[in-house]
DNA sequence: GCCGTTTTCGGCCCGACTGTTTTCAGTCG
């Protein structure tokens, strides 16, 4: 039994209650309770009384306690008896919510997606009161597209938004625009993309967007909101454009950047002050206040500016964020590759690119000999590289260049270099690049033996996942975090947008030492640092927990002190 | 179902778009 199981239980109860047309506030009470549990940073065993959590009262506490003790919930069981499970799938269809599903079920008895599809194809839905031809058509289309609906990983979303930005830049009647929504918050995946567009020419914009190469179809065509389907190759995603013309711009941007939970929390705060927040501004005594920046908006409520990545479940508003790490705090990148292994630039080129970024130190960490596909370094080549790094380091006053490695942890847990070689290095990273299919025990054995090595300072991309493409190997996260503390080994948040590993979910609120690195194989990849920072910010990680916020002097000391 | 101290009852975040209505319900974000 985990916290996730309880969160799922509460959400399931909410869904079934909704289908039973229960009081909407009772429904949202269960949803709020689930969200409150999610926000709480404690593990299940650390929570003494569930009703101490704001949003969980006596009723929900009893439901949770019964579930933990009995392994099942009588409330959920009763609800499931009354309501076919197929109805919960129906609510996933775009355009079909709980109320319409309940209505269809009550009047026709239809309870599966197959039955619904036949009913729609036979044109019978439009004959029910409250439904029409158009609604029937939309629901059928939604049903057929249900399997198509997917979320795209952040690196795909970045590409799509750049394509759209290029198009918008060419429309001279657009005063300014910004990306909003989950893409602006640098979420791991996005289901749609939002833009805020400032212009007086909404009509013209609707005409022009239809001519874009990526335009597939209109989903909505309003003067304030126009939604289209974007299509390029196999990529198909909804893009919403919010059109504004006046001073409401930053309120609209803030509003549609979300997250929903972040905004709900803000509106609660506003309400306490007898104010009302909407996408046009803040209403105070019937007067609408607008802002010249998002910072000014937050300032109005005596709140700090929240970087978009941090605007998540709302708990960020109730904590002091002044110590949360930001991009400016990062003083160096300590995981990057050169032409010695599979990088595209040589040591000197990487050094100069990092100087340009204002870094005070870097570590060169090419692959080890086992990774032959990446031209991993033999003992001799590694020793030669160390020598070259020492020379280059002597040439540059503005930056410290350290000699490191990203060493493979082999399938049996042994390491790819002997301690005799490792002691020549300033910094050793260890990581898994092979035998991903091992059991959790085998994977943990490998990680443990690496972490216990006196030279291994950090574990790179600890789970090996690729967002939307590969699950990663079977890491016992709790055990990993515990081992990290016991062995004084640092865990990486790999900033490559295909990885983001560890993820923000894993590190959320955890008191553990981390390092954020780009794993750059190309000078352009150094730019990935912002995605890693976004991940740390979502995890509410303080700068003191992040190794590469250390100053040049502190980092030097850290190297000299050893493990 | 949860919350609170000017309230233990009466609130609970806000608005756009669509389609089916003839003033609004449902859905979505």
Image (cartoon, coloured by chain):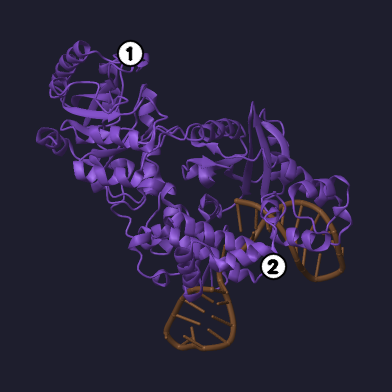
Image disc number at residue A469: none
Tint of chain A: purple
Label 2 crowd (10 A; few <14 / some 14-19 / many >=20):
some
Question: Relative to residue A107, is residue A349 drawn left or right?
Answer: left
Label 2 sits on a secondary structure element that is: loop
Per the image, the residue denoted by label 2 is A21
- Alpha-carbon distance for marks 1 and 2? 62 Å
Q: Residue, x 16% and y 27% (percent of image)?
A: A426
Give x and y (percent) for residue B20: 85, 59
Lateral position of residue A318 relative to residue A81, left or right:
left
Q: Chain of mark 2?
A: A
On screen, residue A34 above or below A273: above
From the viewer's perspective, tell me whether residue A463 is left or right of residue A253: left
Tell me which residue sits at (17%, 21%) in the image. Answer: A418
Q: Nearer the viewer, residue A219 or A212?
A: A219
Residue A474 x %, y %: 40, 37
Q: Position of residue A57 (x, y in %)?
A: 47, 74
Q: Chain of mark 1?
A: A
Quarter in which the N terminus of chain A is drawn: bottom left
Q: Is residue A33 above or below residue A456?
A: below
Figure colour of chain B = brown
């Amino acid at each position: 039994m985990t916290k996730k199981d309880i969160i799922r239980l509460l959400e399931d109860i909410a869904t079934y209650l909704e289908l039973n047309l229960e009081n909407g506030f009772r429904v949202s009470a269960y949803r709020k309770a689930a969200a409150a549990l999610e926000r709480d940073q404690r593990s299940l065993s650390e929570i003494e009384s569930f009703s101490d959590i704001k949003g969980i009262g006596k009723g929900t506490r009893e439901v949770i306690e019964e579930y933990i003790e009995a392994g099942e919930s009588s409330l959920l069981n009763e609800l499931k008896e009354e309501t076919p499970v197929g109805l919960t799938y129906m609510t996933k269809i775009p355009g079909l919510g709980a109320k319409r599903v309940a209505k269809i079920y009550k009047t026709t008895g239809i309870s599966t997606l197959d039955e619904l599809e036949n009913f729609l194809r036979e044109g019978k839905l439009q004959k029910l009161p409250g439904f029409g031809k158009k609604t029937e058509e939309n629901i059928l289309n939604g049903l057929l597209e249900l399997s198509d609906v997917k979320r795209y990983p952040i690196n795909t979303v970045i590409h799509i938004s750049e394509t759209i930005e290029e198009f918008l830049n060419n429309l001279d009647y657009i005063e300014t625009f910004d990306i909003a929504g989950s893409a602006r918050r640098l979420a791991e995946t996005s289901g749609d993309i939002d833009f805020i567009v400032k212009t007086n020419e909404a009509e013209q914009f609707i005409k022009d967007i239809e001519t874009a190469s990526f335009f597939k179809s209109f989903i909505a065509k309003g003067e304030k909101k126009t939604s289209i389907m974007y299509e390029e190759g196999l990529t198909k995603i909804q893009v919403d454009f919010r059109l504004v013309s006046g001073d409401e711009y930053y309120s609209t941007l803030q509003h549609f950047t979300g997250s929903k939970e972040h905004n709900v929390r803000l509106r609660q705060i506003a309400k306490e002050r007898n104010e009302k927040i909407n996408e046009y501004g803040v209403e105070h005594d019937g007067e609408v206040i607008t802002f010249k920046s998002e910072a000014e908006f937050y300032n109005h409520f005596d709140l700090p500016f929240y970087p978009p990545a941090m605007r998540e479940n709302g708990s960020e508003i109730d904590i002091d964020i002044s110590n949360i790490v930001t991009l400016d705090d990062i003083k160096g990148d300590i995981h990057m590759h050169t032409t010695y292994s599979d990088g595209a630039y040589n040591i000197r080129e990487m050094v100069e690119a990092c100087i340009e970024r204002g870094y005070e130190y870097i570590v060169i960490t090419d692959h080890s000999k086992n990774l032959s596909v990446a031209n991993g370094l033999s003992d001799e080549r590694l020793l030669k590289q160390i020598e070259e790094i020492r020379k280059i380091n002597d040439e540059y006053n503005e930056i410290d260049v350290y000699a490191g490695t990203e060493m493979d942890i082999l399938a049996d847990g042994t390491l790819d270099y002997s301690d005799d070689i490792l002691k020549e290095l300033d910094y050793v990273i260890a990581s898994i690049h092979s035998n991903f299919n091992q059991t959790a025990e085998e994977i943990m054995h490998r990680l443990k033996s690496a972490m216990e090595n006196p030279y291994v300072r950090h574990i790179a991309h600890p789970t090996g996942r690729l967002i939307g493409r590969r699950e990663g190997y079977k890491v016992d996260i709790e055990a990993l975090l515990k081992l990290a503390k016991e062995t004084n080994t640092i865990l990486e948040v790999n900033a490559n947008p295909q990885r983001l590993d560890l993820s923000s979910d894993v590190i959320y609120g955890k008191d553990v030492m981390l390092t954020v690195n780009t794993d750059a194989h190309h000078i352009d990849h150094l730019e990935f640092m912002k995605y890693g920072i976004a991940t740390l910010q979502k995890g509410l990680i303080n700068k003191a927990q992040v190794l590469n916020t250390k100053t040049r002097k502190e980092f030097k000391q850290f190297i000299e002190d050893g493990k």
